Image: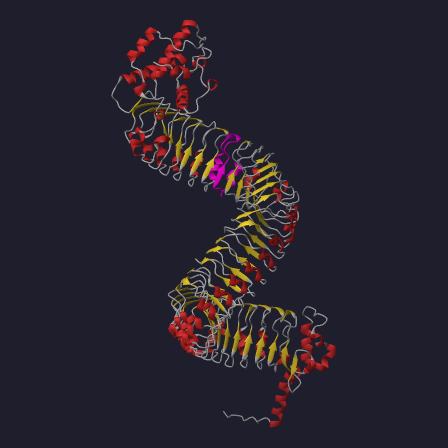
C-alpha cells in the first residue's frame, strides 16, 4: 500500500482563510456595533432623568461614540472604558451584549441600582483590567468565569446581594492586587482561589458570613498584603502566629468575628501597621508588650473581648495613636503613667472594665486633643479634676457608673464644643454648677442617680440645642426653672425622684418636640395646665407619686399618640377625658390610687396595643362588662378597689398575653367565664370580695403557670374542682368565705409549691385529706376553719415544719391533736386555733402549744394538757352540758363570743352589741318568768363560770352544788329582757 502525498495549499490561500476567520470579530467590534449595543441595553433600563449625562447615548449620536459621556475609546476608535459610576442606572445586565467589547479594559458601573445576576459572558472580555460593580443590588452567584479575566488587577463586587459560588471552579488571578467582595451574602469557608492571587495588596471580605478558620497559607502566600479586611463575618479559631509574616500590612481589620485565644506575641513585628481592629471577638489574655514597637499605629480597637490583666505601659510608646478602644473587657488596675505620651489621642474608650483609681489631672493635661473620652462602667474613684476644663475640643464625655465623688467642677463650663455629657450613677454631690449654661452646643445631658442638691440652675435654659435632659434620682429641690420650659428642641425631660416642688406652668406648650416627660416621685402639686394637651409629639407622660389634684384636661390625648401614661398616687379626681386614648396607641396606662370617678373611656376597647393597665384604688363605677375589648398584648390589669358592676366578659379569654388579672373588691357579679381557662400565661388571678356566683370553672386548672388564685368572699357554690391540683406552680390559694360544699380534694396535695392555703368559712365536709401533709412548703397559712369537717386530724400534717399559722377551728373534728404536731417548729403560738371542735386527749407538749392562748383550745371539753383527772375537768363538763340544756344546742357560738369579748377588754362591748340571756335560751320554749327565770339565771351563771378558759378560775363542784341548792340571787336587779351574758359572767361567785 502506498501513501498518497497531497500538495500543500499555497501561502496566499492560508492568508485568505485567516482574514475570513477574523472578519466577524472585526465587524462585531466596530464603533457602530458597540454604540448600538449600548443604546439597546440602556433602553432596557428604567428611563433616565431628563438631565442625565447618559442622554448622549443615543442612536441619533451614533457616529460620535467616543464623545459619549462615560465612554473612552482607544486609538482604533473602539471602546476601551465604560465608566458609568453613579449614573442612576436601574435595571439588569441580562441584556448587555458583551461581545462587541472585546478590547474593553475598564468596566465601572458602581453606585447604581442594577439588579439581577452578573452574566457569565463577562468572562469573554479578556482585556479587562479594572472591574467595579460596587454598590448595586446584584444578586445570584458570582460567575466563576470572572476569574478568566487574567489581566484584571482591580475587582470590586462589594455592597450587593451576591450569594455563594463553587469556589473550586475559580482560577487564580495572577495580576490581581485589589479584591473586594464586602457587604454581600456570601456564606462559606475562605475562598481557596484567593490564596493563589499572590499580588494582592488589598483584600476586603467584610460584612458577609464567611466561616471556619483563616487558612495558614494566607499568611505565607499573600506576603504583599497591605490591607486585610475580614471584619463582620463568622471566622473562628485562634489568630495564627504566622500573621507576622504579613510584614507589609498597614491595616488589619478582623473585628466582629468569633476569634478566640491570645493576641499573637509577634504582632509588634508588623512594623508598618497603622490600624489594628480585633474588636467584638472572644480574645483573652493580655495585650502583647510588643505592640509598643508599632510606632506608626494610629488606631487600635480591642473592645468587646475577654482580655484581662492590666493595660500595658508599652502602649505609651505608640505616640501616633489617635484612636484607642479597650472597652468591654476585663482590664484591671490603674492607668499606666506612660499613657500621658499619647498627646495626639482624639478618641479614648476604656469603658466597661474594672479599672480603678483616680482620674489623674496629668492625663487630662496631656490629652488636650481629645474629641471623645469614655470611661464609664468602671470603678474610678475620687473627684473629677478641674483640669477637665482643658479638653476644649471635647465633644463627648462619658463618666457614668463609677464611684466618682465630690462636686461637678465649674471648669466643665469651658468645654464649649461638648455635645454629649454623661455623669450618671456616681456619688456626685453639691449643686449643678452654673457654668453648665456655657455648654451651648450640648444636646445630651444626663446626671441621674447621684446626690446632687440645691435647685436646678436656670442657666440650663441657655442650652437651646438640648435634646435629652435627665437629672432624675438626685436630691434636687425647689421649683423647675421657668427657662427649662423654653427648651423647644427637648425630646426627653426626666426630673423624677427628687424633691422638686411647685407646679407645671402653661408654658409647657413651648416644648413642642417633647416626647418623654417624667416628673414622678416629687412634691409637685396643682392642676395640670390645659396646654399640656398641645404637646403633639408626647408619647410618654409619668407624673405618679406627686401631689397633683383636679381633673385631667378634657382634650388630653386628643392631639398626640400617647403610649405610656401614669397619674398614679396623686389626688386627681373627676372622670377620665374621653379623648385620652383616641390615638389608640396606649401601651401602658396607670391611674391607680387617686379619686377618679365615672366610667372608663370607651376608646379603651380599641387600644389593641395595651400592655399594662391599673385603675385600682379609685372610685370608678359603671358596667365593666363591655369596657374592654380583645387586647392581644395586655399582660397586667388591676381593677381592684372600685365600684364596678356588671359581669366578667368572655372576651377576656382572648387576651392571651395576660399574666396578672386583679378585680378584687368591686361589685362584679355573674359567673366566672370558662373562657378564662385560655389565659395560659396567667400568674395572678384575684377576684376576691365581689358578688360572683355559680361554680368555679374546672378549666381554671389549665392555668399551669398560676402563682396566686384568690376567689374569696364571693357567693361561689359547688365543689372545689379537682383540676386545681394541676396548678403545680401555685403558691397562694384562697377560696374562703364562699358557699363551697363537698370534700376538700385530696389532689390538692399535689400543689407542692403552696405557701398559703385558705379554705375557711365554707360548707366543706368530710375529713381533712391526709395528702395535705405533702404540702411541705406551706409557710404562711393553713386555714380550714368554719366548715363542717369531721373525724381525726391527719397525723401527716405534722410534716408541715415550715407552717407559721394553723386554724382548724369551728369544725366537727374529733380525736386527739396528733403528737407529730410537736415537729411543727415554725408555728407561732399566737397563730394556732383548734377551738370549737370535739377534740380529746392530750395537747402536744412542745412549748408552742403550751404557750398558746387558752382560746386556741376553747370549745373542746375533753382536750387537756394532762390526762390526770381533776375536779376542774368535771366542772367544765358540767358547764358545757348545762349550757347545752339551756340553749338547746352546743354553745359553740356563745364560746366564740366570750373569747372575742375577752380579747377586747380595752374597748368594752356595749349592751346592744351583746347577747341577751333571753336570746341565748332555747327558742323552742316559752320565755321564763318569775321564779323560773330566777332559777335559769342562776344555772347559766354557774355554767359560765364552769367553762372559764382558765381552769384555776373554775369553781369546784362542791361550790356549784352549794350555790344551786341555796339559789343565790343572780342579777336580781335586772329583768330578763335586759339581762346580758356579760353581766352574768361578771357576777361574783
Q: Is residue 88 above or below residue 584?
A: below
Can residue 514 be seen in the rendering of this structure? no
Q: Quadrant of residue 243?
A: bottom left
Quadrant in which the C terminus appears = top left
Between 234 and 358, the one nearer to me in the picture: 358
Answer with left or right where residue 100 lies relative to residue 325.
Answer: right
Q: Position of residue 690 (x, y in %)?
A: 52, 31
Q: Who's the residue at 49% across and 80% down the image?
A: 199
* Residue 690 is covered by the magenta coloring: yes
Q: Position of residue 840 (x, y in %)?
A: 31, 23
Q: Quadrant of residue 76?
A: bottom right
Q: Is residue 144 above or below residue 687?
A: below
* Residue 923 is covered by the magenta coloring: no
Answer with left or right where residue 385 lies relative to residue 539.
Answer: left
Q: Who's the residue at 55% across and 74% down the image?
A: 156
Between 762 and 26, the one nearer to me in the picture: 762
Q: Position of residue 811 (x, y in %)?
A: 39, 24
Between 462 and 977, the one nearer to me in the picture: 462
Answer with left or right where residue 538 lies relative to residue 201.
Answer: right
Q: Position of residue 875 (x, y in %)?
A: 31, 15
Q: Which residues are magenta?
A: 674-702
Q: How is the image coloured?
A: secondary structure
Outermost residue toward the top?
A: 931
Q: Is residue 934 above or below residue 591?
A: above
Amino acid at each position: 500500500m502506498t501513501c498518497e502525498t497531497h500538495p500543500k495549499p499555497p501561502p496566499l490561500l492560508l492568508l485568505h482563510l485567516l482574514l475570513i476567520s477574523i472578519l466577524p470579530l472585526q465587524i462585531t467590534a466596530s464603533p457602530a456595533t458597540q454604540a448600538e449595543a449600548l443604546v439597546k441595553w440602556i433602553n432596557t433600563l428604567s428611563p433616565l432623568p431628563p438631565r442625565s449625562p447618559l442622554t448622549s447615548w443615543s442612536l441619533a449620536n451614533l457616529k460620535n461614540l467616543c464623545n459619549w459621556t462615560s465612554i473612552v475609546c482607544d486609538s482604533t476608535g473602539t471602546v476601551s472604558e465604560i465608566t458609568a459610576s453613579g449614573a442612576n442606572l436601574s435595571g439588569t445586565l441580562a441584556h448587555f451584549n458583551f461581545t462587541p467589547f472585546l478590547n474593553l479594559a475598564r468596566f465601572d458601573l458602581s453606585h447604581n441600582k442594577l439588579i439581577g445576576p452578573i452574566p457569565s459572558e463577562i468572562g469573554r472580555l479578556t482585556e479587562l483590567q479594572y472591574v467595579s460593580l460596587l454598590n448595586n443590588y446584584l444578586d445570584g452567584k458570582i460567575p466563576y468565569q470572572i476569574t478568566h479575566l487574567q489581566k484584571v488587577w482591580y475587582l470590586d463586587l462589594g455592597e450587593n446581594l451576591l450569594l455563594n459560588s463553587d469556589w473550586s471552579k475559580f482560577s487564580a488571578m495572577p495580576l490581581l492586587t485589589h479584591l473586594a467582595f464586602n457587604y454581600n451574602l456570601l456564606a462559606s469557608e475562605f475562598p481557596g482561589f484567593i490564596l493563589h492571587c499572590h499580588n494582592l495588596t488589598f483584600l476586603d471580605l467584610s460584612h458577609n458570613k464567611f466561616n471556619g478558620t483563616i487558612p495558614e497559607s494566607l499568611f505565607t502566600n499573600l506576603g504583599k498584603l497591605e490591607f486585610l479586611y475580614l471584619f463582620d463575618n463568622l471566622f473562628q479559631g485562634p489568630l495564627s502566629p504566622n500573621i507576622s509574616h504579613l510584614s507589609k500590612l498597614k491595616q488589619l481589620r478582623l473585628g466582629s468575628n468569633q476569634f478566640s485565644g491570645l493576641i499573637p506575641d509577634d504582632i509588634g513585628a508588623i512594623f508598618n501597621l497603622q490600624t489594628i481592629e480585633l474588636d467584638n471577638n472572644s480574645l483573652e489574655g493580655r495585650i502583647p508588650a510588643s505592640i509598643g514597637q508599632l510606632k506608626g499605629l494610629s488606631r487600635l480597637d480591642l473592645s468587646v473581648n475577654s482580655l484581662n490583666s492590666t493595660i500595658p505601659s508599652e502602649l505609651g510608646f505608640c505616640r501616633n495613636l489617635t484612636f484607642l478602644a479597650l472597652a468591654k473587657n476585663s482590664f484591671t488596675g490603674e492607668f499606666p503613667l506612660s499613657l500621658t505620651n499619647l498627646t495626639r489621642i482624639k478618641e479614648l474608650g476604656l469603658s466597661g472594665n474594672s479599672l480603678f483609681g483616680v482620674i489623674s489631672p496629668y492625663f487630662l493635661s496631656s490629652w488636650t486633643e481629645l474629641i471623645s473620652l469614655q470611661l464609664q462602667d468602671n470603678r474610678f474613684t475620687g473627684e473629677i479634676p478641674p483640669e477637665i476644663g482643658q479638653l476644649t475640643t471635647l465633644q463627648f464625655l462619658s463618666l457614668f457608673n463609677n464611684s466618682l465623688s465630690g462636686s461637678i467642677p465649674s471648669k466643665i463650663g469651658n468645654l464649649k464644643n461638648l455635645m454629649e455629657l454623661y455623669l450618671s450613677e456616681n456619688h456626685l454631690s453639691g449643686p449643678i454648677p452654673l457654668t453648665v449654661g456655657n455648654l451651648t452646643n450640648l444636646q445630651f445631658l444626663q446626671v441621674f442617680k447621684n446626690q446632687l442638691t440645691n435647685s436646678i440652675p436656670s442657666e440650663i435654659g441657655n442650652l437651646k440645642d438640648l435634646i435629652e435632659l435627665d437629672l432624675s434620682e438626685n436630691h434636687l429641690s425647689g421649683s423647675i426653672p421657668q427657662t427649662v420650659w423654653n427648651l423647644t428642641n427637648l425630646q426627653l425631660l426626666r426630673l423624677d425622684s427628687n424633691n422638686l416642688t411647685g407646679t407645671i406652668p402653661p408654658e409647657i406648650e413651648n416644648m413642642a418636640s417633647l416626647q418623654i416627660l417624667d416628673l414622678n416621685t416629687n412634691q409637685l402639686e396643682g392642676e395640670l395646665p390645659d396646654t399640656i394637651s398641645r404637646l403633639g409629639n408626647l408619647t410618654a407622660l409619668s407624673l405618679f407619686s406627686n401631689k397633683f389634684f383636679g381633673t385631667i384636661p378634657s382634650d388630653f390625648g386628643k392631639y398626640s399618640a400617647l403610649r405610656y401614661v401614669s397619674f398614679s398616687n396623686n389626688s386627681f379626681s373627676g372622670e377620665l377625658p374621653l379623648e385620652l386614648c383616641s390615638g389608640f396607641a396606649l401601651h401602658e396606662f396607670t391611674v391607680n390610687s387617686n379619686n377618679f370617678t365615672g366610667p372608663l373611656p370607651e376608646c379603651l376597647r380599641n387600644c389593641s396595643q395595651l400592655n399594662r393597665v391599673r385603675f385600682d384604688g379609685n372610685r370608678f363605677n359603671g358596667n365593666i362588662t363591655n369596657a374592654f375589648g380583645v387586647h392581644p398584648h395586655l399582660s397586667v390589669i388591676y381593677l381592684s378597689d372600685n365600684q364596678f358592676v356588671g359581669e366578667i366578659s368572655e372576651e377576656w379569654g382572648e387576651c392571651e398575653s395576660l399574666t396578672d388579672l386583679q378585680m378584687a373588691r368591686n361589685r362584679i357579679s355573674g359567673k366566672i367565664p370558662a373562657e378564662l381557662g385560655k389565659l395560659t400565661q396567667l400568674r395572678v388571678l384575684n377576684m376576691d370580695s365581689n358578688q360572683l356566683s355559680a361554680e368555679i370553672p374546672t378549666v381554671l386548672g389549665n392555668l399551669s403557670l398560676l402563682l396566686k388564685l384568690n376567689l374569696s368572699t364571693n357567693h361561689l357554690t359547688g365543689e372545689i374542682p379537682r383540676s386545681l391540683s394541676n396548678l403545680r406552680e401555685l403558691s397562694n390559694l384562697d377560696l374562703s368565705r364562699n358557699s363551697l360544699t363537698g370534700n376538700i380534694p385530696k389532689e390538692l396535695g399535689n400543689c407542692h409549691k403552696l405557701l398559703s392555703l385558705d379554705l375557711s368559712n365554707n360548707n366543706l365536709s368530710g375529713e381533712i385529706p391526709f395528702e395535705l401533709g405533702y404540702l411541705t412548703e406551706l409557710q404562711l397559712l393553713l386555714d380550714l376553719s368554719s366548715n363542717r369537717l369531721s373525724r381525726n386530724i391527719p397525723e401527716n400534717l405534722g410534716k408541715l415544719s415550715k407552717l407559721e399559722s394553723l386554724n382548724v377551728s369551728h369544725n366537727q373534728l374529733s380525736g386527739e391533736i396528733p403528737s407529730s404536731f410537736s415537729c411543727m417548729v415554725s408555728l407561732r403560738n399566737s397563730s394556732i386555733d383548734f377551738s370549737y371542735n370535739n377534740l380529746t386527749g392530750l395537747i402536744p407538749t412542745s412549748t408552742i402549744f403550751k404557750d398558746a392562748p387558752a382560746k386556741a383550745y376553747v370549745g373542746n371539753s375533753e382536750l387537756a394538757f394532762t390526762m390526770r383527772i381533776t375536779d376542774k375537768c368535771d366542772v367544765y363538763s358540767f358547764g358545757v352540758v348545762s349550757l347545752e340544756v339551756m340553749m338547746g344546742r352546743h354553745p359553740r357560738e356563745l364560746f366564740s363570743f366570750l373569747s372575742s369579748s375577752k380579747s377586747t377588754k380595752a374597748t368594752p362591748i356595749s349592751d346592744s352589741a351583746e347577747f341577751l340571756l333571753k336570746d341565748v335560751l332555747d327558742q323552742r320554749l316559752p320565755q321564763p318568768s318569775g321564779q323560773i327565770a330566777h332559777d335559769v339565771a342562776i344555772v347559766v351563771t354557774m355554767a359560765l363560770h364552769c367553762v372559764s378558759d382558765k381552769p384555776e378560775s373554775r369553781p369546784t363542784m362542791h361550790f356549784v352544788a352549794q350555790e344551786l341548792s341555796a339559789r343565790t340571787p343572780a342579777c336580781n336587779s335586772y329583768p330578763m329582757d335586759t339581762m346580758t351574758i356579760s353581766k352574768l359572767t361578771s357576777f361574783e361567785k
